[in-house]
Image: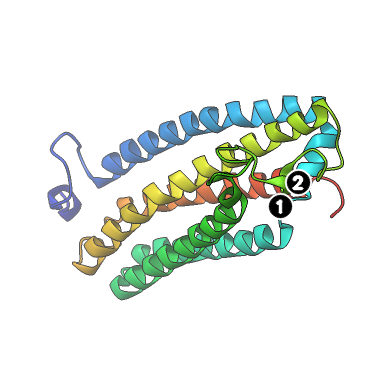
Amino acid sequence: MTDAAHHPSLQHQFVDLGQQKEAAALGMWVFIAQEVLFFGGLFAAYAVYRHQYPAAFSAGSHHLSWKIGFANTLVLIGSSLTMAMAVHSAAIGKRRRIVGYLLATVLLGSVFLGVKYVEYGEKMRPCFGDGPYAGCLVPGERFSASALHLEGDEGRHAQIFFSLYFGMTGLHALHMIIGIPIILTIAVLAGRGAFSPAYHTPVELVGLYWHFVDIIWIFLFPLLYLIGAH
């Protein structure tokens, strides 16, 4: 029997750490597969409605700041880099680097969410109050049919775009909100020396989850922010 067979992190139902890692990785890939199906429904709805109402979607996209979206994309790509470095550091047994890179990932993820909070606030603020647009889904006169240079049903079609915008980006943000405390937990465990080159599966799996979340945004950014020429 090898030392790995007696590792304190080895669960009793597994023969060795290799088998345990394979089972954990399979579970994560199954989870990601169902997440792809989950987001896939939203992307399918987006494709159908964009095909039916291209002018309304293009006009709606022009009321999003592509510069803010692009900056947030860079932030999220940076978080993927720091997460990859955390996984690499775990593989070579650099405990302090693991913690540092994981905390950097949390910081960048928090910056992304902070920017989304400001962006959401700017769009939704006119919807709260006693004015004619109180309780609106598409905020204020800035998103009215006339502001979008659309008439009749086209204005309502633009509201479909913003409904998908809030739904898709909101669901993405929820995945990040869930992921950040998980990363913090892994960072605490790493600081206590729970991981080594022989066993760092949790770091790899949380990294896989984070990369998936980042990839979803890579699709969301052009589909929502870059429709037509800005």
The quadrant of the image that shows the C terminus is bottom right
Report if the CB atoms under discs 1 and 2 are less than 8 Å apart.
Answer: yes
Residue designated by label 2: 61
| Mark 1 and mark 2: Cα distance apart in space | 5 Å
Image coordinates for residue 47, horizontal then vertical, percent:
73, 29
Report whether 116 appears left or right of 200: right
Report whether 91 appears left or right of 119: left
Q: Residue at x 67, y 46 (%)?
A: 140
Residue designated by label 1: 64
For this rendering, which residue is in front, 165 or 155? 155
Image coordinates for residue 119, horizontal then vertical, percent:
59, 56
At mark 2, the secondary structure is helix
Image coordinates for residue 106, horizontal then vertical, percent:
41, 63
For this rendering, which residue is in front, 212 or 53? 53
Within 10 angstroms of label 1, few (less than 14), some, or many (20 or more) residues? some
For this rendering, which residue is in front, 129 or 65? 129
At mark 1, the secondary structure is loop
Q: Residue at x 29, y 71 (%)?
A: 95
At label 2, which amino acid type do we have? Ser
Image coordinates for residue 9, horizontal then vertical, percent:
17, 50
* Quarter of the figure with residue 192: bottom left
Relative to residue 151, is residue 94 depicted above or below? Answer: below
Within 10 angstroms of label 2, few (less than 14), some, or many (20 or more) residues? many
Q: Residue at x 52, y 60 (%)?
A: 112
At label 1, which amino acid type do we have? Leu
